[in-house]
Image (spheres, grey):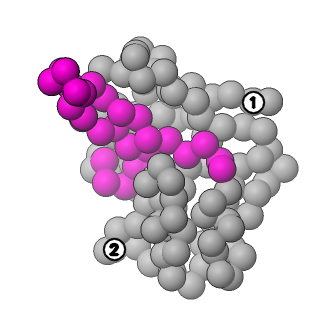
Amino acid sequence: MKRLEKNEALCIGCHQCEIACAGAYYKTEDPKYACIRIEDAEQENGERRSVIHICNQCGKCSEVCNTGVIRQNPKGVYMVQKSECVGCLMCVGFCPEQVMVQSDDRETPSKCVACGICTKACPTGAIYIVED
């Protein structure tokens, strides 16, 4: 199984992973199109830290897809069959990591396909690919 993993202690909140993902799949540097999310969060002690939201290939999106167009490939990666998707967006609402990407100018949602573009852009190694 191929998936992304994270080490939030290494994340510096530079958002290079989001920019790389959006650029690779949507030809834009706008992070709203990225299938990875970096959130700047405040801890209980008042310090700021970065929270990394990545697709861990849990399959929740596939479970709630009422048309069955989100399927797992042989490497364990869940893929959206865009030509069959009706755009109901159930998967977007049920993603526990909130990384199913939907925008007003796209009819169908997108999700991480564990391509590794974001891992190559990360200067600290905070995100990386694991293959079981």
Q: Nearer the viewer, mark 2 or mark 1?
A: 1
Q: Position of residue 74 (x, y in %)?
A: 84, 50
Q: Position of residue 9 (x, y in %)?
A: 40, 17
What residue is at 38 percent from the left and 43 percent from the top?
37
Does the segment drawn in magenta span residue 123? no
Callout 1 amino acid = Glu
Label 2–label 1 contact, CB within 8 A: no
Q: Residue at x 35, y 68 (%)?
A: 103
Q: Is residue 132 shown above or below 114?
A: above
Q: Which residue is mark 1?
A: 131
Disc on res. 7: none
Find residue 52 and report its horizontal and vertical position in percent: 41, 35
Q: In the displayed structure, would residue 116 be above or below residue 97?
A: above
Q: Is residue 63 left or right of residue 99?
A: right
Q: Residue at x 50, y 41 (%)?
A: 54
The crowding category of the residue bearing disc 1, from other C-alpha atoms within 10 Å (few below 14, some 14 to 19, many at least 20), is few
Q: Quadrant of the N terminus?
A: top right
Q: Amino acid at mark 2?
A: Asp
Where disc 2 sits, the SS reads loop
Residue position marked by numbered label 2 in the rendering: 105
Which region of the structure is painted magenta?
31-58
Residue at the far front: name it: 44
For the question of whether residue 19 can be seen, the reply is yes
Q: Is residue 47 left or right of residue 63?
A: left
Farthest residue in the left direction?
46
Is residue 83 at least partly visible in the picture? Answer: no
Between the residue at mark 2 and the residue at mark 1, the CA separation in whole angstroms equals 33 Å
Q: Is residue 34 above or below residue 106?
A: above
Badge 2, how many Cα within 10 Å: few under 14, some, many 20+? Answer: few
Rendered residue at 60%/79% (across/down): 85
Task: Examine the rendered structure and indicate whether residue 10 appears above or below residue 117.
Answer: above
